[in-house]
Amino acid sequence: MDGQSPEKLILVKRESNGVALVMINRPGSLNSLTRPMMVDLAQAFKRLDRDESVRVVILTGSGRSFCSGVDLTSAEDVFKGDVKDPESDPVVQMELCRKPIIGAIRGFAVTAGFEIALACDILVAAKGSKFMDTHARFGIFLSWGLSQKLSQIIGANKAREVSLSATPLTAEVAERLGLVNHVIEEAELLKKSREIADAIVKNNQDLVLRYKAVINDGLKLDLGRALSLEKPLITVPVVDRNAESIRAKPQKSKERAHDYYNGMTKEQFRKMQEFIAGRSSKKQSKL
């Protein structure tokens, strides 16, 4: 393992296939987070984002828990520290990470652990795992986006129940609500996570990064503006106050698709044809 803190509480392993495994490694305390661990976790994601050999990141916890939240015995150090510093904020660095992040959840993901899980792009959970928001129980104001992210995924009413009552959300229910992608036996947790990672690694890396960015950026916008992240021009209704009528007016978007298409090379088109030809030959060989 590389990229370890002195106490080896955040472990990072770069695997040969382009997948990196990050492990919160404080099993005796159910992987509760101290301030130094939060800083180390943030810096681990920052390094992995810059590492061109890494294409997908799997985040998990050692032992019986994914992350049981902030270590309340050192809560003052956590909450009175420089909480506005993005360099030491693991959720900020996870959100800035361009690489897809797969969360492999076992046991408990509580409060800060729940928020870290929500910063992942894909969640695989072991049967019996639980997500829990205890902000209201302990009187701690949230700051990592749980109030908005959870309601977007599972709906406002269910999110209110989970957060205001501090009621555990089981992995099985979370899967039905669309929060968790897969619920599997604990022994298969990392295997399933690696299968998903391997499937991502096989695809066009540049497009994977762009696709993740478009999806995640679009979630922060209304549908009309989110659609404009793809198309070079959109037509939106605007009020012409002089004519006192509604008319359509072209409005430029960020033109991601247009810029991407313009930048495509002959080599990219050649690889597309090779990929299609390869799939066709595989189909023929099965007949």
Image (cartoon, rainbow, N blue to C red):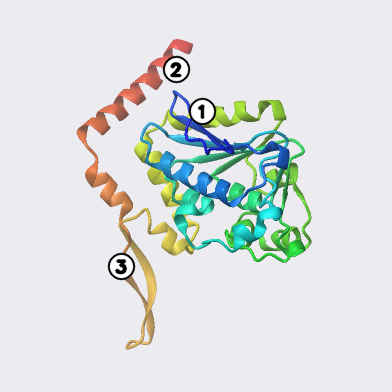
Q: Residue at x 64, y 53 (%)?
A: 112
Helix, strand or loop under label 2: helix
Looking at the picture, which amino acid does disc 2 mark?
Answer: Lys
Compared across the picture, whether 180 is left or right of 6 comes to: right
Whole-percent x, y for residue 47 in the image? 42, 41
Whole-percent x, y for residue 197 in the image? 51, 31
Looking at the image, residue 131 lies above or below residue 238: above
Do callouts 3 and 2 mark residues in contact (Cβ within 8 Å)? no
Whole-percent x, y for residue 176 in the image? 70, 45
Please name whichever residue, 213 or 235, is drawn nearer the observer in this view of the structure: 213
Residue extending furthest toward the front: 6
Q: Which mark is residue 1?
A: 1
Q: Tell me the distance, in whole angstroms, between the alpha carbons under discs 1 and 3.
A: 53 Å
Whole-percent x, y for residue 132 in the image? 73, 52
Count residues near mark 1 (Cα–Cα under 10 Å), then give few for <14, some for 14-19, many for 20+: few
Give the mark nearest the N terminus, 3 or 2. Answer: 3
Query: What residue is pinned by disc 3?
Result: 250
Q: Nearer the viewer, mark 2 or mark 1?
A: 1
Please name whichever residue, 81 or 184, is drawn nearer the observer in this view of the structure: 81
Q: Residue at x 61, y 47 (%)?
A: 117
Q: Tell me the distance, in whole angstroms, between the alpha carbons under discs 3 and 2.
A: 45 Å
Helix, strand or loop under label 1: loop
Give the mark nearest the N terminus, 2 or 1. Answer: 1
Looking at the picture, which amino acid does disc 3 mark?
Answer: Pro
Query: What residue is pinned by disc 2?
Result: 283
Q: Tell me the distance, in whole angstroms, between the alpha carbons under discs 2 and 1.
A: 41 Å
Looking at the picture, which amino acid does disc 1 mark?
Answer: Met
Looking at the image, residue 55 lies above or below residue 257: above
